[in-house]
Image: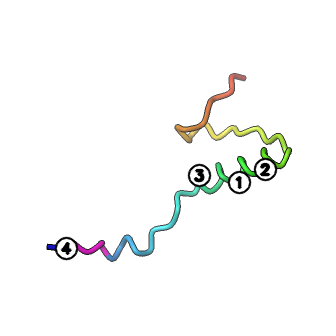
Amino acid sequence: MQISVASRLQHTEEYYFSKKLREIELMNKAGANVINRASAVPTCRRIPL
């Protein structure tokens, strides 16, 4: 028995913050020294004020 993927999932895109985190990582690797203040993203380390 094979279960097919729900049709509503065919139009699901990548999570917004995962794109932004990748952009920030690339910018930091390029030497931009970007400070990431994305406190809503659980995978980010929080920087104390």
Q: SS for tag 2?
A: helix
User: Disc 2 and disc 3: Cα gap in Å?
Assistant: 15 Å
Q: Residues within 10 Å of mark 2 (few under 14, many from 20)?
A: few
Q: Which residue is mark 2?
A: 27
User: Disc 2 and disc 1: Cα gap in Å?
Assistant: 6 Å
Q: Which residue is mark 1?
A: 23
Residue drawn at the location 72% of the way across and 23% of the way down: 49
Residue 2 as seen in the image, left or right of residue 9: left
**Amino acid of disc 3:** Phe
Between discs 1 and 4, the one toward the N terminus: 4
**Amino acid of disc 1:** Glu
Relative to 39, residue 27 above or below: below
* Residue 29, horizontal then vertical, whole percent: 78, 46
Quarter location, residue 38 = top right
**Amino acid of disc 2:** Met
Relative to 18, residue 40 above or below: above
What is the span of residues highlighted in magenta in the rendered image? 2-6
Q: SS for tag 1?
A: helix
Q: Which mark is residue 2?
A: 4
Between discs 4 and 2, the one toward the N terminus: 4
Judged from this view, the residue extending furthest toward the top is 48
Residue 26 as seen in the image, left or right of residue 31: left
Q: Nearer the viewer, mark 4 or mark 3?
A: 4
Residue 26 as seen in the image, left or right of residue 6: right
Label 2–label 1 contact, CB within 8 A: yes
